[in-house]
């Protein structure tokens, strides 16, 4: 199994540009999570999906952030417009089951730099 | 909401010694407590977890203890090795999922 796949691995963009991060969960997993990691705030859960349906998006910082999961094998996290304070490592994770009692498998992350 | 505090933020030990990382949580509804290890440039990886109906769990050199009354849980690594050097995160799950702030562990050969 290839594990959770994220693309791109690195993204450098200018303030105001749209950024789209992509994730392919492990086949057969029905829950998908988006996290943001910064030195200041640590690991933050942004949103998670169960069976392609958003369950909890209370961690999404503001309306500039949006996430979709059109099918069981693909999800996107979009930032529009991007700002320098969005610079962080964004992780996607998947699990078999929901939030409780289930190991989450993390992807390698996307390092986003907004200039 | 949940508040997970983790201590210490950095920890250095000599190879072969033990390392202990402690976490406290605030939400009494939390009932699942995983520990993740994150190596440089990689995503976190689960190393051990414990559920609220268990007080202690051990897996080779790694053990976790849980005190639900006091709302704290700890990670114990014995006979530390250089490859144990990483950042370790505790987490608590109830109605939400919160990570602790992380502990950077360095094992000195």
Image: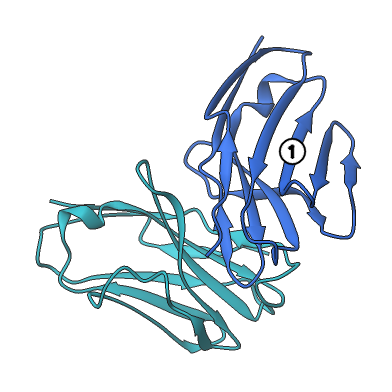
Chain colours: A cyan, B blue
Q: Is residue B43 left or right of residue B81?
A: left
Q: Which of these two is toward me, A85 or A26?
A: A85
Question: Tag 1, which chain?
Answer: B
Q: Residue at x 82, y 24 (%)?
A: B78
Residue position for label 1: B74
- Res A25 quadrant in image: bottom right
- The percent position of residue A99, horizontal first and vertical second, equals 65, 72
Asked if residue A24 is positioned above or below residue A115 in the image, the reply reads below
Instruction: Check disc 1: other Cα within 10 Å, few if <14, some if 14-19, many if 20+.
Output: many
Residue at x-position 85% and y-position 31% = B61
Q: Is residue A70 above or below residue A14?
A: below
Residue pictured at 67% horizontal, 32% vertical: B21
Along the viewing direction, whichever of A10 and B57 lies nearer the viewer: B57
Name the secondary structure under disc 1. Answer: strand
Q: Quadrant of residue A52?
A: bottom right
Q: Position of residue A97 (x, y in %)?
A: 71, 77
């Amino acid at each position: 199994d290839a594990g959770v796949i994220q693309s791109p691995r690195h993204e450098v963009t200018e303030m105001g540009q749209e950024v789209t991060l992509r994730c392919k969960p492990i086949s057969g997993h029905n829950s998908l999570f988006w996290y943001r990691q910064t030195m200041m705030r640590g690991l933050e859960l942004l949103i998670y999906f169960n069976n392609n349906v958003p369950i909890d998006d209370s961690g999404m910082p503001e309306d500039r952030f949006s996430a979709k999961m059109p099918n069981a094998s693909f999800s996107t996290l979009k930032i529009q417009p991007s700002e320098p304070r969005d610079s962080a490592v964004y992780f996607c994770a998947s699990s078999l089951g929901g939030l409780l009692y289930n190991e989450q498998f993390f992807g390698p992350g996307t390092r986003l730099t907004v200039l | 909401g949940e508040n997970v505090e983790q201590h210490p933020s950095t920890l250095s030990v000599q190879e072969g010694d033990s390392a202990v990382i402690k976490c406290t949580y605030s939400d009494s509804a939390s009932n699942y407590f995983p520990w993740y290890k994150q190596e440089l440039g990689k995503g976190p990886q689960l190393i051990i977890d414990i559920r609220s109906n268990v007080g202690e769990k051990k897996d080779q050199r790694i053990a976790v203890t849980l005190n639900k009354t006091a709302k704290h849980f700890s990670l114990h690594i014995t006979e530390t090795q250089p490859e144990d050097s990483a950042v370790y995160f505790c987490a608590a799950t109830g109605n939400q999922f919160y990570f602790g702030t992380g502990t950077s562990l360095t094992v000195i050969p």
